[in-house]
Amino acid sequence: MAGRIKGITVEIGGDTTKLSKALEGVNKNIKNTQTQLKDVEKLLKLDPTNTELLSQKQRLLADAVSSTSDKLETLKKASEQAAKTKDNYDAWKAKYDPIKQKIGETETKMKELKEQAKTADEQLSKGEISQEKYDALQREIKETTDELTSLKESAKAVSDEFGNPISPQQYDSLQREIVETQQELQNLQREAENSRTALVKIGEAGATMEKVGDKISGAGEKLLPLTAGITALGTMAVKTTADFDAVMSKVSAISGATGEDLDALRAKAREMGSQTKFSASEAGEALNFMAMAGWKTEDMLGGIEGIMNLAAASGEDLATTSDIVTDALTALGMSADDSAHFADILAAVSSNANTNVSLMGESFKYVAPVAGAMGASAEDLSIALGLMANSGIKGSQAGNSLKNALVNLTKPTKQQTAAMQQLGFISTETIQKIDFEKVEKAEKAVESATYSLDNAQIKLNDAITKYGENSTQAQLASNKYEEAQKKLIDAQ
């Protein structure tokens, strides 16, 4: 999500700064808290009634709620400011772009002058250049430095004049970030309340147990509070079972699995829930994304373990990780049998490059369909995205940039064609066989489907926020979201 607000500049506490920079601290706190929560959840699976662990979980959830509330407040302030200035964007751009272009030209010139200056001292001592030429170079460097400083001041003045406006696309992205952060906050608050209730019930049950040991007489009366506590815990267990059944019903509806196939999927989800830090319901959600990608029962049974290991190692959400892997495999023309191998590739890139699984997923969303059509391997594509990440180009920006580079290889300009022919990359016969119209049409279809999926996500979040997760409106929005997902998969 953080990639959406990249480049948005706002005034925070009287200082003009990048919104992503202003949120850097709170995002770090949220990530650290989530990591600790996952560790506590893993321990709670082994000892569900451990009050010390439940208390620790309660404290961590309170921290997460506080940090997420701070983030939401910052985003809302930024939105209020952006709403006042977004209409100034076109006027600002018309005045700012010429200055920005001039800054780029001047920076290029400065770089060339500094390269010359590196050898000028040595050349002067050897008599290879005159003192007059050396002094002229130093003057030019000084004048160019002053010019660059003046241009940057002018650019800042223009931005200040128009209130640092953001583009309509950036404004929409900011609204999406707010909606998703609101949903995340509501989920955390609901989880905190459930955790508090469980802790209270277990505490009540424990206190009653002590009384039973002291006063065995009148056991019928003494056991009443204990019975209530056990009933409450039983209710929680029933709810957990109901949640799991609901998830697996969805898997059955989408995949068409019934009878023995569905039983096998249920058993696998439970197995993964007992062997990993994720619950059986979360494993079911991962299966749901596989089903939406068109995977059959055997594919899901064989592929889920690699995906869950990747999610556990990366710290990413399990359902999101499943979505990333299934979409990328489809786009690259790989099969479900390759899921474990592909998960290993993502894990390797995430640990050896300046990126993570979530950002890689964003990149694959844009570049994988084109790369897959060109026969690129997952290894080569991941290495390229990892190298780009190390240069600060990540997420959707990396995916779009690499996609455009690949498209230029298939539909090059005359100069690009000449260069590739000279390097032996292609021949004239190759160029003549490529159906450029088909490639372009396929790219537009993927872009359109991706945009529709993003909009469906926003509407789903809105419906859940306004009417509740189990409302008719939320269910309709969820159906639309699933349809949009299938259309994107088809387009890819």
Image (tube, rainbow, N blue to C red):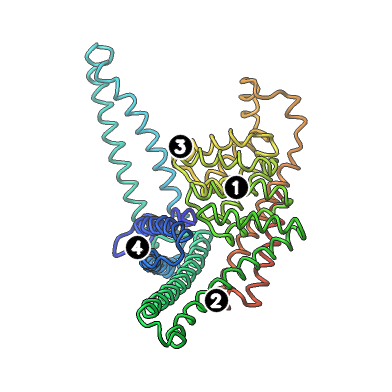
Secondary structure, mark 4, is strand
Q: Nearer the viewer, residue 111 or 288?
A: 288
Residue indicated by mark 1: 305
Q: Is residue 403 above or below residue 446?
A: above
Q: Amino acid at mark 4?
A: Glu
Q: Could you tell which of marks 2 and 4 lies nearer the N-terminus?
A: 4
Q: Amino acid at mark 2?
A: Thr
Q: For the residue carrying disc 2, how many other residues have a C-alpha within 10 Å: few (<14), some (14-19), or many (20+)?
A: few
Q: Kindly report which numbered mark, 3 or 1, lies closer to the viewer in this rendering.
A: 1
Q: For the residues labelled 3 and 4, say whether their Cβ atoms are less than 8 Å apart.
A: no
Q: For the residue carrying disc 1, how many other residues have a C-alpha within 10 Å: few (<14), some (14-19), or many (20+)?
A: some
Secondary structure, mark 2, is helix
Is residue 181 left or right of 240 when viewed as pictured? left
Q: Could you tell which of marks 3 and 1 lies nearer the N-terminus?
A: 1
Is residue 149 left or right of 242 when viewed as pictured? left
Q: Kindly report which numbered mark, 3 or 2, lies closer to the viewer in this rendering.
A: 2
Residue indicated by mark 3: 352
Quarter holding residue 440: top right
Q: Could you tell which of marks 1 and 4 lies nearer the N-terminus?
A: 4
Cα–Cα span, label 2 and label 1: 30 Å
Residue indicated by mark 2: 235
Q: Kindly report which numbered mark, 1 or 4, lies closer to the viewer in this rendering.
A: 1
Q: For the residues labelled 1 and 4, say whether their Cβ atoms are less than 8 Å apart.
A: no
Residue indicated by mark 4: 11
Provide residue 462's location: percent of width, then percent of height: 57, 72
Q: Nearer the viewer, residue 142 or 396?
A: 396
Q: Amino acid at mark 1?
A: Glu
Q: Nearer the viewer, residue 474 or 100?
A: 474
